[in-house]
Image: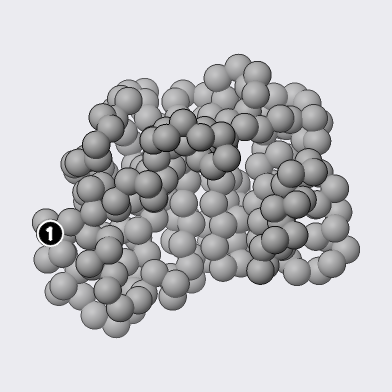
Amino acid sequence: MRWRRVDDDPALVGALARVLDDRERERAARRRNPARYITAHALLRQCAGEALGCPPRDIVFERTCATCGSHRHGKPSVVDGTGLSVSLSYAGRLALVGLSWSGEVGVDVEEVDESDFDGFNAVTLADVEVPALDVLSGDELRLARARVWARKESVLKATGHGLVVDPRQVVVSGPSEPPALVAWHGQHPLPGPVQVADLDVGQANHLAAVALLSAEPMTLTVVSG
């Protein structure tokens, strides 16, 4: 896993943008904050290029939605990636990329304040998850919401379903418990065992998680840059 701070410096953003392909640059231009999109996708190309031993600009990505089969959205994959699974996420001032040779990977990073909103329980939590958060307040509640949301999103990114699957159908362990997928109630069955881990991205206002679809023990390496 690798994370990078988002910098709005035009020279740096311009240099990162040159690593992207035409479609990525077009999508970035439509974003309210292009720097976040550009930073995340440039980091993804850098990491995949290092893993595959090729220039970042030469990598071809495609997307496939696990629910509808569309190639217009969904989990990114490397064309001719020889078994390399990739995932990316960005929020606030942070971009995060995950790579795995052992199974499909999903990463998610959340800005703590963005996960703290009215109605969080109603749109995010299954009934069995509510009690663990209802006893919290203040900063503890803010952090718990971001933690639970990151765990759920990492699982949905690993499976390739994204938010097409209702987050309430993805039951994860409580914020004070070791990270785990407790139950999956999605319409489509899981493709295999799911492991979940919290990630330390070195930023107090960001929390992150990773999910891996594999029975092999998950070994994590988290670096910045």
Residue type beneath disc 1: Asp
Camera sees residue 190: yes
Residue 27: percent from the left, percent from the top? 69, 53
Q: Give the image's coloring scheme.
A: one colour
Q: Is 58 on the left or on the right of 194, as rendered?
A: right
- Which quarter of the figure has residue 23? top right
Toward the viewer: 124 or 146? Answer: 124
Residue 71 in the image: above or below residue 214: below
> What residue is at 60 percent from the left and 17 percent from the top?
82
Residue 42: percent from the left, percent from the top? 72, 47
> What residue is at 72 percent from the left and 40 percent from the top?
46
Task: Tell me the residue that label 1 is attached to.
Answer: 127
Residue 70: percent from the left, percent from the top? 51, 35
Q: Quadrant of the N terminus?
A: top right
> What residue is at 69 percent from the left and 24 percent from the top?
52
Toward the viewer: 176 or 67? Answer: 67
Q: Is 77 on the left or on the right of 198, as rendered?
A: right
> What residue is at 81 percent from the left and 69 percent from the top?
9
Determine whether the residue tagged by mark 1 lies in a helix, strand or loop: helix
